Image: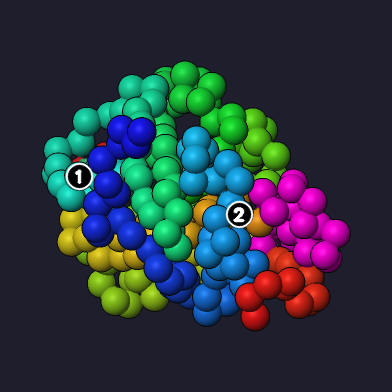
Amino acid sequence: MNILAPVRRDRVLTELPQCLRKEAALHVHKGFHPRVTCACQEHRTGTVGRFKISKVIVVGDLSVGKTCLINRFCKDTFDKNYKATIGVDFEMERFEVLGVPFSLQLWDTAGQERFKCIASTYYRGAQAIIIVFNLNDVASLEHTKQWLADALKENDPSGVLLFLVGSKKDLSTPAQYMLMEKDALKVAQEMKAEYWAVSSLTGENVREFFFRVTALTFEANVLAELEKSGSRRIGDVVRINSDDSNLYLTASKKKPMCCP
Ligand SMILES: Nc1nc2c(ncn2[C@@H]2O[C@H](COP(=O)(O)OP(=O)(O)OP(=O)(O)O)[C@@H](O)[C@H]2O)c(=O)[nH]1
């Protein structure tokens, strides 16, 4: 018996959402990996779609807008008053990707130094790490490297997808934004993270960004399931965070067995 309500219509993904900037993208393929599409059509996604919940952690300096980002996506609300996150908080979001149910647990962590040690105990087991900085505060961009290092202490760097997100885009002039974006793209490339710029106030890019996180996390999960179930023999190599400058989620060039 299915006791869960159907997934909201605006949480259904039938296509791979595209990256924001090709220079700093986890991959630039137009669609889902053919093996993922095929596995979904044939209901061969293993634990993905049944009990699996993917953990996503959101880290970054205090007041960069982590809570607002999550609230804009999950609740479509925006609070202009700052209330520090104490320790952690989380939201569950249910999606349907290529017909397969898929859930994300979005962990909002505290940026304030005094709450950081509580928050860091929740970093473990993340499948995606979202590192947020304020597009109007260059120091917060510099600090992203330390946030990433701390988050990776608790996670396997080769098995996690990274996203670098510039927040509060509404507060930058186009000229200021261009300057900041140049630096941010460099940092994202160094980290092997996908770059996004958003505004939780206006909602710009928020939905696109979370859909991209969902789609790429789903894709990585299904590829990992296929590998685990022995499909590796047909030659697919799944590697997240390879050394390729623009293709961190890779697969071999061998033809998939089923769909083209
Ligand atoms: N103009 C503008 N303000 C924003 C935006 N996002 C967040 N803010 C404001 O920035 C302040 C901090 O936002 P939060 O989301 O609470 O920041 P946080 O990163 O969760 O902070 P900590 O919980 O301390 O780590 C609040 O006053 C928000 O209203 C945005 O996109 N545009």
Q: Quadrant of residue 86?
A: top left
Q: Residue at x 78, y 64 (%)?
A: 236
Q: CA distance from mark 2 to mark 1?
A: 32 Å
Residue 233 appears left or right of 129: right
Main secondary structure found in the magenta portion:
loop
Reply above or below: 17 against 99.
Answer: below
Q: Is residue 227 magenta?
A: yes
Residue beneath disc 1: 75
Q: Secondary structure at mark 1?
A: helix
Residue 84, given in percent of the width and then of the height, sits at 28, 29
Q: Earlier in the sequence, mark 2 or mark 1?
A: 2
Q: Residue at x 46, y 70 (%)?
A: 16
- Mark number displayed over residue 116: none
Q: Residue at x 18, y 50 (%)?
A: 76
Q: Residue furthest front?
A: 1
Residue 156, given in percent of the width and then of the height, sits at 70, 39
Ligand 1 picture quarter: top left
The answer to which of 192 and 241 lies nearer the viewer is 241
Q: Is residue 14 magenta?
A: no
- Please name which of the two marks, 2 or 1, marks the residue nearer to the observer: 2
Residue beneath disc 2: 44
Q: Which amino acid does the dot numbered 2 rest on?
A: Arg
